[in-house]
């Protein structure tokens, strides 16, 4: 158990819908990273937050957005969902620079 | 664009064998290289390497980084069936005020009894 929690574990929804994935980092960690893992694309970095501020952006679609709240939990919002958005979404947290990132258990999103 | 290439993509060995997994990279503003083990769940952290030539060890696993030649290897000695997993290499690069990770495709290791 890494100490990073993610909810929900599984999410099934329809195309065009909007969902919110939640992540609570390990106690003391200020950085939160979001990743998408699909069968055909492997693990892809989406976005990083550090103490509430966006720090780095990867291959994140415009339909996706994220934020980190004052209590350091983070949410990833996915809108206008498409079939191709079906994937495992991981959150990871870390402390210092350079980070050692600890992954949460992931949220499996299925878009029907 | 950052690039991380792992080889081999798949490896099948017998218990007790020693394996070497490779990771080569091209990245701007390198900060660190990380190895993860992924079974049927989230990746778990193995090693972080930032300096060239310094071996990191944890039990039967060890790893070393060559920043001049831009590669790293992960060695596993006396393999066990519990070592069966996908091993992911990732490179961390500095951004203006943060960092990003680029992952390789992974090496699927299967250890047969």
Image (cartoon, helix red, strand yellow):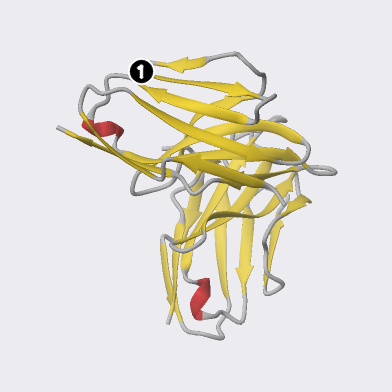
Q: Which quadrant, please, contains the N terminus of chain A?
A: top left
Kindly identify the residue that appears in the image at 67 percent across and 19 percent down: B51
Image location (x, y in percent) of residue A49: 72, 49
**Image quarter of residue B48:** top right
Q: Is B60 or A20 nearer to us in this picture?
A: B60
Q: Chain of mark 1?
A: B
Q: Residue furthest left?
A: B113
Q: Secondary structure at mark 1?
A: loop
How crowded pointer 1 is (Cα within 10 Å; few <14, some 14-19, many 20+) is rated as few
Q: Toward which corner of the image does residue B84 lie, by quadrant? A: top left
Say above or below: A72 vs A62. above
* Residue at numbered disc 1: B60
Quadrant where the C terminus of chain A is found in the figure: bottom left
Q: In the shown orientation, is residue B50 left or right of residue B13? A: right
Residue A31 in which image quadrant:
top right
* Residue at x 35% of width, y 18% of height: B60
The residue at the far right in this view is B96
Q: Is residue B74 left or right of residue B67?
A: left
Residue A17: x %, y % from top left: 55, 83
Q: Nearer the viewer, residue A28 or B96?
A: B96
Q: Percent from the top left, x then y, of residue B6? A: 50, 41
């Amino acid at each position: 158990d890494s100490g990073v929690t993610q909810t929900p574990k599984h999410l099934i929804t329809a195309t065009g819908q909007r969902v919110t994935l939640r992540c609570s980092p390990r106690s003391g960690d200020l950085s939160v990273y979001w990743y998408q893992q699909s069968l055909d694309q492997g693990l892809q970095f989406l976005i990083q937050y550090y103490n509430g501020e966006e720090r780095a952006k990867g291959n994140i679609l415009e339909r996706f957005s994220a934020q980190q709240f004052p209590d350091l939990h983070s949410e990833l919002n996915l809108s206008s969902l498409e079939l191709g958005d079906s994937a495992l979404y991981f959150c990871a947290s870390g402390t210092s620079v350079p980070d050692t990132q600890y992954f949460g258990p992931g949220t499996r999103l299925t878009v029907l | 664009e950052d690039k991380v290439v792992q080889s081999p993509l798949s490896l099948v060995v017998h218990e007790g064998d020693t394996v070497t997994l490779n990771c080569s990279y091209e990245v701007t503003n390198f900060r660190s290289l990380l190895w993860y083990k992924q079974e049927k769940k989230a990746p778990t952290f193995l090693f972080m390497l930032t300096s060239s030539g310094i071996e990191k060890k944890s039990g039967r696993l060890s790893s070393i980084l060559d920043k001049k030649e831009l590669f790293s290897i992960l060695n596993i000695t006396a393999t066990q069936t519990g070592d069966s997993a996908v091993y992911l290499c990732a490179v961390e690069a500095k951004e203006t005020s943060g960092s990003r990770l680029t992952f390789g495709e992974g090496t699927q290791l299967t250890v047969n009894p």
